[in-house]
């Protein structure tokens, strides 16, 4: 059952995380839309909310021609084609095609024929797979030409072009200018030279940078992550590309400053996407604060912590393992075990930072481990079994925890694994899936903050916070931390 006020709040925020979760029928026009439709928001009294496009059409609403409800994530035809198209874009961003993989090989990874892949990409994105790849390559090249000092030839190959001639031809054809013109226009910009490059990621102010760092610091995995007083750094492995990244804050520019090794240039879009998820850069703090601030319990914390974010996950598998390790123990204890886990299963890497020496463990590596290999790290048998089941589900492709994945489907798959309960599944949904309305009602800290209530009472109390319950949970955790301090 959809709460109309909750759905209306989500619709007016146009938060893409709600796309496909519900649909809105507008009685004054007879049209139904996705919650991210760009038309002017209708009045609340003219809105009806439906869980599916079929339900809206059953009530004789016509689909919007602008937002095209049939393309909503998880609701497109042909085996959830829109979601598959989105995942294909992610694979392209992660450099899959840069290794020379043919269209047939890419299609095989999705368990379909190349003909099916072509049809899905053309229908959902309006371009052919080749055009999709070329557009992504050109956009990456344009960004690198404008914001870095990488040589043009290196940018051409890093963007996936097989030759400088093809790069120049594609650039001139699409943008009607040679690549060197962008480089000349960017020449006066102060760009970092050497083995690293720097880019900016903008956000909507305010941004609680100190609070975000504090959250990440308490959960940082030794040798993989490093959180100082003013920056976050970590090792990175995306496909076959490894390196490190460091993120600082430029409050005057309302942006985060990202320094990354040039070894990660071929997977730069994927890297930046993961950082946007980790630091919750798509949030609307104004709308969230206005809604949660109406609650008398949350109001003082909303005022005290302007711009609070829900830190996401750089890597879904890493986050899932961390969540399992955190079951029924303190954050500090879970972090200690997570560090042991990384030391046991993460590959070594050399960086300029003595604190960053390992890559995060891969699902493929953990899936090959035995129960004894995991248990000897001080992890009880039940959790060891959960970790191995999680890793094998990832390796088999039965489970993915990418930002934007359908939360209900992902939670159902998670709780079907041995040892994964609702708390763990909702915590993963909150961070790895970036689901803004996740609520781990079993969380003892949340229940204590609400006056030592039961899980059922906590669930009832949380209804007033929807659709931003994830942010409410962070405020409650922050309130308890302040009391302890």
Image (tube, rainbow, N blue to C red):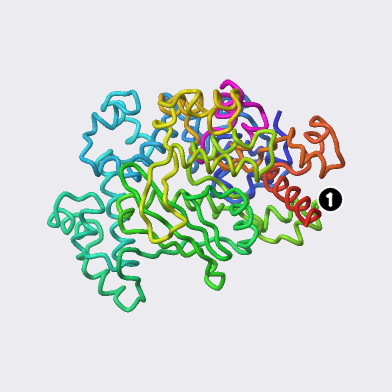
Q: Which residues are magenta?
A: 403-426
Query: Is residue 102 or residue 454 the one in the foreground?
Result: 454
Q: Quadrant of residue 131?
A: top left
Q: How many marks?
A: 1
Query: Quarter of the image containing the N terminus?
Result: top right
- 189 sits to left or right of 99: right
Q: Quadrant of the C terminus?
A: bottom right
What's the residue at 23%, 70% (across, down)? 181
Question: Hey, which quadrant is residue 111 in on the image?
Answer: top left
- Was residue 412 drawn as part of the magenta stretch in this picture? yes
- Residue 329 image offset from top left, x and y in percent: 69, 37
Q: Is residue 64 above or below residue 385?
A: below
Query: What residue is shown with label 1?
Result: 297
Residue 418 included in the magenta stretch of the image: yes
Residue 26 location in percent, x, y? Answer: 64, 39
Q: x and y percent of residue 406 in the render?
A: 54, 33
Question: Residue shown at 63%/53% (left/top)?
Answer: 215
Q: Is residue 385 left or right of residue 182?
A: right
Query: Residue farthest to the bottom?
Result: 188
Residue at the location (44% across, 58% down)?
Answer: 354
């Amino acid at each position: 059952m959809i709460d109309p006020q909750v759905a209306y709040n989500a619709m007016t925020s146009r938060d893409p995380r709600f796309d496909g979760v519900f649909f809105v029928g507008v009685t004054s026009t007879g049209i139904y839309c996705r919650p991210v439709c760009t038309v002017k928001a209708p009045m609340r009294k003219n809105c009806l909310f439906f869980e599916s496009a079929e339900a809206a059409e059953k009530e004789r609403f016509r689909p919007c021609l602008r937002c095209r409800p049939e393309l909503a994530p998880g609701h497109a035809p042909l085996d959830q084609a829109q979601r598959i198209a989105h995942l294909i874009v992610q694979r392209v961003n992660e450099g899959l095609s840069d290794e020379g993989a043919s269209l047939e090989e890419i299609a095989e990874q999705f368990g379909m024929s190349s003909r099916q892949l072509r049809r899905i990409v053309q229908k959902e994105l309006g371009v052919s797979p080749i055009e999709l790849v070329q557009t992504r390559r050109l956009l990456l090249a344009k960004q690198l030409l404008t914001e870095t000092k990488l040589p043009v030839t290196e940018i051409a190959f890093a963007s996936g072009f097989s030759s400088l001639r093809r790069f120049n031809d594609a650039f001139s054809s699409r943008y009607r200018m040679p690549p060197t013109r962008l480089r000349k226009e960017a020449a006066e910009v102060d760009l970092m030279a050497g083995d690293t490059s720097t880019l900016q990621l903008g956000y909507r102010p305010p941004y609680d940078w100190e609070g975000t760092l504090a959250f990440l610091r308490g959960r940082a995995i030794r040798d993989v992550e490093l959180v100082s007083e003013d920056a976050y750094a970590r090792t990175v492995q995306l496909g076959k590309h490894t390196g490190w990244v460091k993120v600082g804050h430029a409050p005057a520019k309302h942006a985060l400053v990202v320094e990354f090794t040039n070894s990660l240039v071929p997977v730069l879009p994927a890297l930046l996407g993961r950082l946007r998820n980790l630091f919750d850069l798509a949030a609307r703090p104004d709308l969230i604060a206005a809604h949660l601030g109406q609650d008398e319990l949350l109001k003082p914390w909303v005022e005290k912590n302007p711009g609070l974010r829900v830190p996401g996950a750089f890597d879904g598998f890493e986050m899932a393992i961390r969540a399992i390790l955190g079951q029924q123990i303190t954050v500090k204890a879970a972090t200690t075990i997570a560090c042991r886990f990384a030391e046991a299963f993460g590959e070594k890497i050399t960086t300029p930072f003595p604190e960053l020496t390992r890559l995060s463990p891969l699902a493929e590596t953990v899936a090959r481990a035995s129960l004894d290999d995991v248990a000897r790290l001080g992890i009880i048998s039940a959790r060891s079994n959960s970790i191995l089941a999680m890793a094998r589900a990832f390796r088999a492709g039965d489970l993915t925890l990418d930002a934007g994945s359908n939360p209900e489907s992902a939670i159902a798959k998670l709780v079907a694994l041995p040892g994964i309960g609702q708390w763990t599944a909702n915590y993963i949904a909150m961070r790895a899936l970036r689901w803004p309305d996740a609520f781990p009602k079993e969380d003892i800290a949340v229940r204590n903050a609400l006056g030592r209530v039961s899980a059922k009472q906590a669930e009832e109390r949380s209804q007033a916070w929807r659709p931003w319950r994830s942010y409410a949970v962070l405020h409650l955790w922050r309130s308890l931390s302040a009391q302890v301090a």
